[in-house]
Image: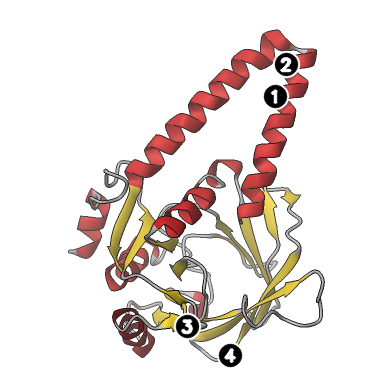
Amino acid sequence: MIPVLCAGIILVDVIIVVGCHFAPHVAVPCSVLLVLYLAWFTHQSYGDAEVHDADAAARILYEAQAGRTPELPEKLKGVFWMSTNAASELLATFEGSEFDPESSTFKLRSGAPLNWSYSTGTVGWIYWAFLRLSYPLCSKLHFRFDPEYTSADMPLYMCNCVRMPMGMTWTMEQIDENNWDRNIYFCWSPDSKSKYASYILRRVIDGSGNELPALQEMMTGIEQRTKVKGCTEKPMQQIINGWPGGGGCCGLLPGPDAQRLLL
């Protein structure tokens, strides 16, 4: 989703430059307001970010989103662990996303509150910041499933309508009731998935709130500092975007919503 932010920044710059040239009396104050808005959003985002242990983060994501997308197929409900993903992210939930049963499609909002977790550490915070700033650009990852909900392609859109070129193709294929292949194909090898970039999604909390065996496997791997694909150790503490008015101090203090959800 980082390409969305980069494209968005370029688009905003182009609009500002063109606007200042042709209509400076309108473009200049609008540009100032835009900069002020982004500064306010950045400040708010750091205040709303929360840091929790991985198992607590999984429970918070579940409690926050459970039941918000009732028509979503049961096998897509709950919380999922990106088990073999070497990137600075660990957990995701699809509930709470915009869902259209007629087209078998749901749209996950990038950088939205309480749908994703990111690893702490320098790289993780940078990764979080990039994805968080895609939120005001209305970045959405579309999951377009077949009628049986066994496979999906995953195009990325900005501003709800502009499909973003990413240089890669993302898909999702069901393995069994709790596990999914997240395949990634680069443009230079469109018929062969990347073994390093692709990963397996494993459900750790089901749609009814039950903890599954994969949750303990996840925690054991973190505690034993197991390297994902031989290179990345996932930290115990995870960043999540809380509701506005959540924690402070760059996520070092849990917000009131997190405290409530953990009770």
Relative side of 201 to 45, left or right: right
Relative side of 188 to 248, left or right: right
Q: Are marks 1 and 2 in contact (CB under 8 Å)?
A: yes
The residue indicated by pointer 2 is: 20
Question: Where's the C terminus, which quadrant?
Answer: bottom left
Q: Earlier in the sequence, mark 1 or mark 4?
A: 1
Q: Amino acid at mark 4?
A: Ile
Which residue does the image show at 43% across and 81% down from the upper left? 227
Residue 76 at x, y percent in the picture: 51, 76
The residue indicated by pointer 4 is: 175
Q: Earlier in the sequence, mark 1 or mark 3?
A: 1
Q: CA distance from mark 2 to mark 4?
A: 53 Å
Compared with residue 119, is residue 6 higher up or lower down, i.e. above or below? Answer: above
Residue 202, label in figure: 3
The residue indicated by pointer 1 is: 16
Crowd around label 3: few <14 · some 14–19 · many ≥20 (10 Å):
many
